Image (tube, rainbow, N blue to C red):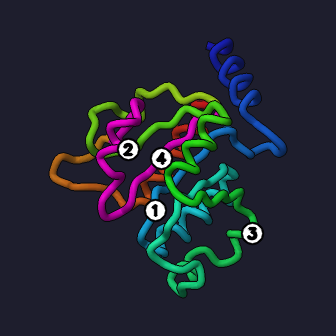
């Protein structure tokens, strides 16, 4: 049992970059459309120290008072990369040899059973419509957060927090 603890600790150390909590996985938001969610996710990324990617265009301005109220000054502490569209983001993934995983309600593959590795990027779609079918079909790796069958979905910021916490505990 102790060997398992040591091994998992070593694995976590291998995924750590500059500081004790900077993680080598990332979250990406595909053209998010709710400023409050994006603000909360930036705040979460800053506090848990994981990189955040956002694929533009956004349907709101980063000067929107709802965004600014949720993000406060945490944007200054977030490793944030904005991509000018899907193609630019895919070039980034290919050049960095990143594995892309889609978080979706349209799969049965539980994130609890998924084996995350360093440099994974988990993609979350728009709050209102997810990702386009072409992107959904193009991404082979998919995960979902199992939920009560009587409910539709979790809030995007909540979903990002749940998945990020699981990855951190696994790596």
Q: What residue sits 69% from the left and 24% below the top?
A: 11
- Looking at the image, residue 110 lies above or below residue 57: above
- In whole angstroms, how far apart are the C-alphas of marks 2 and 4? 10 Å
Specify the quadrant that holds the N terminus: top right
Left or right: 112 in relation to 116? left
Label 4 residue SS: strand
Q: Judge whether 126 appears above or below 134 on screen.
A: below
What x and y, as percent, mark residue 137?
A: 32, 37
Whole-number angstrom distance, CA of label 3 to CA of label 4: 22 Å
Q: Which residue is mark 3?
A: 76
Residue wearing tag 1: 31
Q: In this image, 99 relative to 76: left or right?
A: left
Name the residue at 53% across, 85% down. Answer: 64
State the image quarter where residue 112 is shown: top left
Q: Secondary structure at mark 3?
A: helix
- Mark number displayed over residue 123: 4
- Name the quarter where the C terminus is drawn: top right
**Residues at badges 2 and 4 in contact (C-beta under 8 Å)?**
no
Q: Is residue 10 magenta?
A: no
Residue 125 counted in the magenta span: yes
Q: Is residue 142 left or right of residue 85?
A: left
Q: Seen from this angle, which residue lies furthest left?
A: 150
Question: Looking at the image, is mark 1 or mark 3 earlier in the sequence?
Answer: 1
- Which span is picked out in magenta? 119-145
Q: Which residue is mark 2?
A: 135
């Amino acid at each position: 049992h102790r060997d398992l603890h040591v091994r998992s600790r070593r694995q976590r150390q291998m995924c750590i970059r500059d500081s004790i909590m900077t993680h080598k996985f990332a979250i990406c938001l595909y053209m998010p459309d709710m400023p409050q969610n994006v603000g909360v996710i930036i705040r979460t990324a800053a506090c848990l120290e994981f990189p955040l990617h956002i694929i533009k265009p956004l349907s709101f301005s980063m000067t929107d008072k709802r965004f600014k109220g949720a993000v406060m000054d945490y944007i200054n502490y977030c490793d944030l990369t904005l991509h000018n569209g899907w193609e630019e983001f895919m070039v980034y993934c290919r050049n960095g040899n990143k594995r892309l995983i889609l978080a979706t309600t349209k799969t049965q593959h539980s994130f609890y059973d998924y084996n995350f590795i360093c440099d994974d990027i988990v993609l979350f779609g728009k709050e209102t419509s997810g990702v386009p079918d072409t992107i959904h079909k193009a991404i082979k790796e998919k995960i979902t957060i199992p939920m009560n069958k009587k409910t539709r979905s979790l809030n995007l910021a909540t979903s990002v927090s749940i998945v990020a916490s699981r990855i951190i505990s696994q790596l």
